[in-house]
Image (cartoon, rainbow, N blue to C red):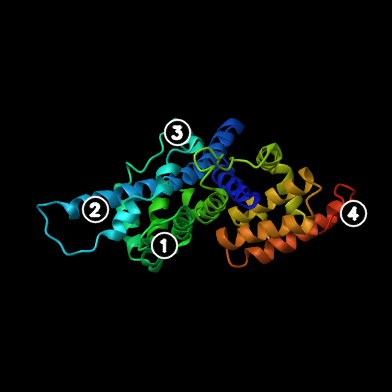
Amino acid sequence: MLTRSLLRTKIAQVLYANINTDNSLQEFDNELTYSIKKSYDLYHLLLLLPQDIAFMAQKEVDMLSSRLLKTDENIDPLVNLAQQQFPQILSLNSSLVKYTNDNSISWSNYEEERNKLYKRLKSTVFFDRYINEDKLDFDTEKTFWRKFFRSADIFDDSFEAFLEEQNIYWLDDLGVTLGYIDKTLSKITEVNIADIDLLPMYKDKEESDFVVKLSHAAYLKGDDYNNLIAKFVSKWDIERITKMDMVLLRMAIAEFQQFPLIPINVTINEYIEIAKYYSTKKSRIFINGILDKIAKSLIEDGLLKANKC
């Protein structure tokens, strides 16, 4: 499920937290594993929202329908939301049930935020468009929930702030996770919804091996990489390079050496992109220049093959 770009970012975050510390490799691995697992937890937590929101709609319907409460409000849209088949069957999906039960994942501790999501949903344009049908078929319901997970009005800045409060890694995961939820929903049909396999944490063993090899090389060979970097920063004192820039340079060198089949330009561009979000304004130019020099030097010394896309 996790893209290599996101995996690189997670390694960079954990390496940043552990660089120049006395933490063991096991401690480093534990933190990285936790970070990656939290992304997978978020994927499942968000997939629980349809059933939770349908439940909230039913509670509101019950309240408005109470004989003790007189109201002229049209509750048909809420009834439609509460009685949708899609969230009810999705909540029974075997993979979703197993993972959320095994890992104690639910919205029970986030009731306030769940209420906010529900209110924002009811104020969206697509809510009125898709929920007022006399009879909602499966495809219409699925489209409704794909609209829900794509909505920037629902998953807005306040929701990002909520995620950041819950876990420092979740904020960076939201965009990618919502994209993978949309991919998941696109594959769901009325026939397979209850038993379709959800996306795996890693696409395959090659992806999990990528994480181990890259993170271990970047963490364990820091002194070697620092010495190599120092050769190309003659106008700079290496101690003045920002901590994140050093992390990204070390990771890129590790990737050059551990994954020679990845084109050099691809590797450099990946770390430039990370620098745009996690380092200074000038970092991407600095990192691009240093990595280009290092790559050329390694090629000249026969330590790296010229492999450009």
Residue matched to label 3: 103
Observer-side mark, 2 or 3, equals 2
Q: Which mark is residue 60?
A: 2
Instruction: Please say if 202 is above or below 289.
Output: above
Of mark 2 and mark 3, the one earlier in the sequence is 2
Question: How many angstroms separate mark 3 from mark 4 (CA)?
Answer: 50 Å
- Cα distance between the residues tagged 4 and 2: 70 Å
- Residue bearing the label numbered 1: 156
Q: Secondary structure at mark 4?
A: helix
The residue lying at 69 percent from left, 36 percent from top is 205
Residue named by callout 4:
300
> Type of residue at label 1?
Asp
Image x and y of residue 282, in percent: 62, 67
* Labels 3 & 1 near each other (Cβ < 8 A): no
Tell me if label 2 and label 3 are in contact, CB under 8 Å: no
> For the residue carrying disc 4, how many other residues have a C-alpha within 10 Å: few (<14), some (14-19), or many (20+)?
few
